[in-house]
Amino acid sequence: MIGFFALAAGFLTLLVLFMAGRLIMGPTGADRAVALDAMNTLVIGIMILLAAHFESVVMVDVAIVYAALSFVSTMFIARYIEEGRK
């Protein structure tokens, strides 16, 4: 079971690289914002999987704080994009 967590975290890391490519090459700001949000979600998933792999409760706490900060940053980016359209 421990190998499963490491394998899943490796797969999510590969997906983060694809999202980083979308973040760089996104044609619009909205595409970049969605890619950043998806990348943050994948990073949170990686943190949770690694916490399960290493049996670390502290890493789960860090992932929760990261998720909250990611949510706030997504709201600020959405507001910035919306103001740019006016």
Image (cartoon, grey):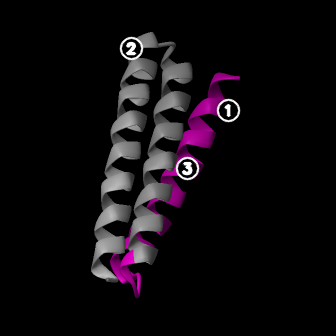
Residue 74's spot in the image, x, y percent? 38, 54
> Which of marks 1 and 2 precedes in the sequence?
1
What is the magenta segment's predominant secondary structure?
helix
Where's residue 13, x and y in %?
49, 51
- Local packing at callout 2 (Cα closer than 10 Å; few below 14, some 14-19, many 20+) is few
Residue at the far front: name it: 86
Question: Which three-letter amino acid code belongs to the residue tagged 1?
Answer: Phe
Residue at the right extreme?
1
Which quarter shows the C terminus? bottom left
Kind of residue at badge 2: Val
Question: Residue 4 lies in magenta, yes or no?
Answer: yes
User: Judging from the image, what secondary structure is the residue with disc 2 in?
Assistant: helix
Per the image, the residue denoted by label 1 is: 4
User: On the image, numbered disc 2 is attached to which residue?
Assistant: 58
Quarter of the view holding residue 84: bottom left
41 relative position to 81: left or right: right
* Position of 47 relative to 70 (above/below): above
In depth, the one of 81 and 64 nearer the eye is 81
State the extent of the magenta-drawn residues as a range: 1-29
Q: Residue at x 36, y 24 (%)?
A: 62
The disc, 2 or 3, on the residue closer to the chain's N-terminal end is 3
Residue 21 belongs to magenta span: yes
* Eye-nearest disc, 2 or 3: 2
The amino acid beneath tag 3 is: Leu
- Could you tell whether 77 is left or right of 42 in the image? left
